[in-house]
Amino acid sequence: MPFRAMTIQQAAERLHLGVREVEQLVKRDGIPFVRRGTEVVFVRRDLDAWASQRLLGMESDSVTAHHRVSTQRRQQSLDHDHLVPMLFRAEWMAAGLLSKTKPSVMRDMVALAAKTDLLYDDAALFHGLQEREELCSTALDEGVAFLHTRYHDPGICGDSFVVLGRTVQPIFAGAADGKTTDIFFLLCCQDDVLHLHTLARLCAMAHATSLLADLRQAETTAEMMGALVRNENAVLQGI
């Protein structure tokens, strides 16, 4: 139910924030909300889209703290929280993309997603990526981008997955520091909760481990997969 209304308490729980912090964001118009009479409510899909954008803009320490809370809450109901074996496959990666522009890398990443046999609508995914990038780039300063759509349609894929590509030639993808990007993840999740947790996990790995350097040194997709597994284990050990 993507248009379900949520209270401040429910929004705070979903965002891993305190109620007072959410109230302050509302006062500053720093978060999407609507008023129903005197009550402040949040539309779930808009809240999740905002949370995704917020994650990409966090500093390293804030990402680590957010990821720790997100992981601890998931571990309360799961035996483990290893996302890499669940969402990634070596055959869903490319170590030598020939893309030279931002539009071409998005097309190539969608083509890579189609190879999973889990994607039902290539055109819808590409259009969603374009809309998200027009809103704000998903490229970070470390030379990595986390491509995703603003809203998540559970009918676009048969299961959640992430594909990974490394371009031969780094390209300008809109990172805030104006530098180029060569590592591209494309997240395709069937629900926003998993998407936000996966994004937090990958951002934490990019900030706090040797993941990006390892991916750049990898000669094969098997080595790229190994780097993901190794660095996810490293970041989970710090929880």
Image (spheres, rainbow, N blue to C red):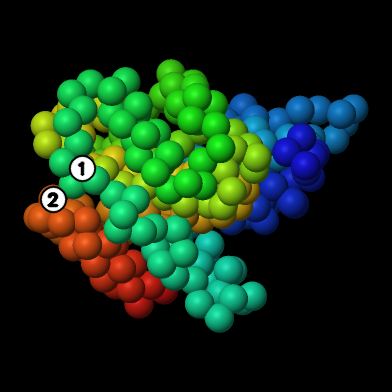
Using the image as rendered, state which of residue 165 and residue 203 is in the foreground.
165
User: 61 or 234: nearer the eye?
Assistant: 234
The answer to whether residue 202 is above or below residue 151 is below
6 left or right, relative to 222: right
* Callout 1–callout 2 Cβ contact below 8 Å: yes
Front in this rendered view, residue 134 or 176 = 134
From this view, report whether residue 196 is shown above or below residue 3.
below
User: Along the horizontal axis of the image, is 148 left or right of 1?
Assistant: left
N-term mark: 1 or 2: 1
Mark 2 surroundings within 10 Å by alpha-carbon count, few (fewer than 14), some (14 through 19), many (20 or more) = some
Question: Which label sits on residue 50?
Answer: none
Mark 1, residue position: 166
Label 1 vs label 2: CA separation?
8 Å
Question: Which amino acid, mark 1?
Answer: Arg
Q: Position of residue 16 (x, y in %)?
A: 59, 56
**Residue indicated by mark 2:** 216
On the picture, is 238 further left or further right than 149? left
Q: Residue at x 36, y 59 (%)?
A: 89
